[in-house]
Image (cartoon, rainbow, N blue to C red):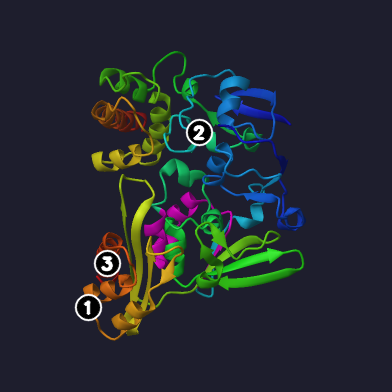
Amino acid sequence: MRIEVEINGRAFEGEVEARTLLSDFIRHGAGLTGTKVGCEQGVCGACTVQLDGEAVRSCLMLAVQANGRAITTVEGLSADGDMHPLQRAFHESHALQCGFCTPGFLMSMEAYIREHPDADEEELRDALAGNLCRCTGYLGIIEAVGRAAREMRGADVQRD
Amino acid sequence: MKPSRFEYRAPGSVEEALPLLRPESTVLAGGQSLVPLLNLRLAIPELVVDINGIAELDYIHADDGVLRIGAMTRQVVLERSELVRRRWPLLHQAVRLVGHPQIRTRGTVGGSVAHADPAAELPVALTALGARFHLLSPGAARVLGASELFLGPLHTAREADELLVEIEVPEQPEGAGSGFAEHARTHGDFATAGAAAVVGPGGHAGIALLGAGPVPARADEAERALADGAEPPEAAALAAQGIEDEHRRALCTELARRAIEQAAA
């Protein structure tokens, strides 16, 4: 089946089987290997991308279901090589060890903070629960997400 | 693991979808339970009928006090609905406990009902609310209550040629409160036990337990006791009295107490 998907603002066309998962199309069809594949059963969150701006598990969608839709992957987070505030905060707070889970965390939390700019730490912890870090570096991740949320709020204030 | 090969159809309307349904086919709604089963090859359908393109099944509205939810309504839409939060708060409380935000973005209300996982929150909340489930097949339609629809774990009365199209939730009495309590080993994981309760003036009570049996079931005796003036702990004990396993019974009793107290507060 022929599909056309917009990924990070660029059109990708490809021939896929109906059973091809969106995660595999992103990695192998579009060649964007920032999105990681962990459990392939919706538990670990490593494959999280954004579908029309909302966080989804790309291993739980068929690639054909993304036909005509807009996907954002971790490669789409930073514009012109500048790190997104969330990426910068992960760097500064040492919120990654092996880094395999990081793209999923970033794509989940970017969508969450955009929808809940005033989330407190408890709410942020709650929102993080859908992503697993096997290095168990959660404290750094919690610190980074809090730092990024504050910075993203500040950026909004400046824009206003 | 990857899914085995299947034929794929994506009808654009209910009318187009119905003739495709047969024992060898499976309906793909939000996919948050079905796609893991496909990936693990626990489900090997010949045909996948993807109903995500059926816009006519995506709605939430109230008619004459009755809430009507289209089967393809995303869980996140239910969660954000001001109408639901105001008038059927139990559904708002329950849906926030379904999986994680990334799951609720795609997961649907109808999919959760049709999948009938005994640990799922929405079927339990809908049971406590006395919801009715609309099924369509080519040339026929029927409406079932929760006790008629839910037959066992992952097993409903839906026939292979039927499609769940709507969930209807009756009006709740003026001034009714609601509560939902559950226990999961880790946050966002499947709950081991839970309870949903609606308590209103004039002796109105709807109580259903999660994890007490193979299907969500109304706790009739506890409801009657509450109507007759029983205190929440007493009603909670009645709700869970039939559970054999001691740990599960203790857990359900405590969660039912919390849900009932929350509803009565």
Give the mark toward the camera: 1 or 3: 3
Q: Residues within 10 Å of mark 1 (few under 14, many from 20)?
A: some
The reply to whether callout 1 and callout 2 are in contact (CB within 8 Å) is: no
Inspect the magenta stretch and tell me whether residue B93 lies in it: yes
Q: CA distance from mark 3 to mark 2?
A: 36 Å
Residue A130 point in image, percent of width and height:
38, 38
Which residues fall within the magenta stretch?
B66-95
Q: Main secondary structure of the magenta part?
A: helix
Residue that numbered label 3 is attached to: B253
- B14 to the left or right of B206: right
In the picture, the disc for residue B231 is: 1
Q: Secondary structure at mark 2?
A: loop
Query: Image quadrant for the C terminus of chain A?
Result: top left
Whether residue B176 is visible here, answered yes or no, is no
- Residues at marks 3 and 2, common chain? no
Q: Disc 2 marks which amino acid?
A: Glu
Q: Secondary structure at mark 3?
A: helix
Residue that numbered label 2 is attached to: A40
Residue A82 point in image, percent of width and height:
41, 15
Q: Disc 1 marks which amino acid?
A: Glu
Which residue occupies 30% across, 82% down? B225
Inspect the magenta stretch and tell me whether residue B184 lies in it: no
What is the chain identity of the residue bearing mark 1?
B
Q: Secondary structure at mark 1?
A: loop
- Residues at marks 1 and 2, common chain? no
Residue B93 point in image, percent of width and height:
37, 58
The reply to whether callout 3 and callout 2 are in contact (CB within 8 Å) is: no
Please state which of residues A152 and B264 is positioned toward the viewer in this rendering.
B264
Which image quarter: residue B82? Answer: bottom left
Residue B185 point in image, percent of width and height:
30, 47
Q: Residues within 10 Å of mark 3 (few under 14, many from 20)?
A: many
